[in-house]
């Protein structure tokens, strides 16, 4: 009997996400069509994750974090927003935003 057991699971992916290349949250959210209102740390906007008639979405312009008070959509940065809004993988969203570098 000759057992040829040469299946090796080399699954080493090079992680090349460049967070510092993400666009500025204000620029990004404006381009996504959000009308940001309010003067505090958290800006208000109509939520894009549900049928919103009254601004329920809160976004932070320093970190890009967002949270909807009505439907509960939330994330810590614009990458998370982009993934959820456009149903993309992490990598695809990072590429879309110009923050992925091919190694
Ligand atoms: Zn919502």
Image (spheres, grey):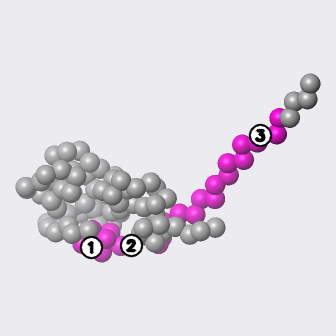
Counting from the top left corner in percent of width and height, residue 86 is at: 33, 58
| Magenta span of residues | 5-30
Kindly tell me whether residue 75 is visible in this rendering: yes
Real-space Cα separation, disc 1 to disc 2, in angstroms: 10 Å
Q: Nearer the viewer, mark 2 or mark 3?
A: 3
Looking at the image, which residue is at 13% across and 52% down?
51
Q: Nearer the viewer, mark 1 or mark 2?
A: 1
Counting from the top left corner in percent of width and height, residue 77 is at: 37, 59
Looking at the image, which residue is at 72% across and 47% down?
10
Q: Which residue is mark 3?
A: 7
Please tell me how crowded label 3 is: few (under 14), some (14-19), or many (20+) other residues with Cα within 10 Å. few
Element at badge 2? loop
Looking at the image, which residue is at 52% across and 67% down?
100
Question: Mark on residue 81?
Answer: none
Looking at the figure, which quarter contains the N terminus? top right
Please tell me how crowded label 1 is: few (under 14), some (14-19), or many (20+) other residues with Cα within 10 Å. few
Q: Which residue is mark 1?
A: 31
Tell whether position 28 is magenta.
yes
Is 29 left or right of 37, judged from the image as shown? Answer: right
Label 1 beta carbon within 8 A of ligand 1? no
Please tell me how crowded label 2 is: few (under 14), some (14-19), or many (20+) other residues with Cα within 10 Å. some
Helix, strand or loop for the magenta stretch, by majority: loop
Is 60 left or right of 12, judged from the image as shown? Answer: left
Is there CB contact under 8 Å for labels 3 and 1?
A: no
Counting from the top left corner in percent of width and height, residue 69 is at: 18, 48
Is there CB contact under 8 Å for labels 1 and 2?
A: yes
Q: Which residue is mark 2?
A: 23
Compared with 4, 59 (above or below) is: below
Looking at the image, which residue is at 83% across and 35% down?
5
């Amino acid at each position: 009997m000759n057992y040829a057991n040469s299946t090796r699971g080399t699954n080493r992916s090079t992680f090349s996400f460049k967070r510092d290349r993400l666009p500025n949250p204000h620029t990004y959210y404006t381009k996504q069509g959000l009308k940001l209102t309010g003067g505090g740390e958290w800006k208000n906007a109509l939520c894009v994750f549900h049928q919103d008639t009254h601004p329920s979405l809160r976004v932070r312009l320093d970190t890009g974090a967002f949270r909807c008070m009505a439907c509960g959509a939330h994330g810590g940065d614009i990458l998370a927003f982009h993934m959820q809004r456009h149903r993309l993988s992490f990598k695809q969203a990072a590429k879309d935003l110009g923050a992925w570098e091919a190694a």
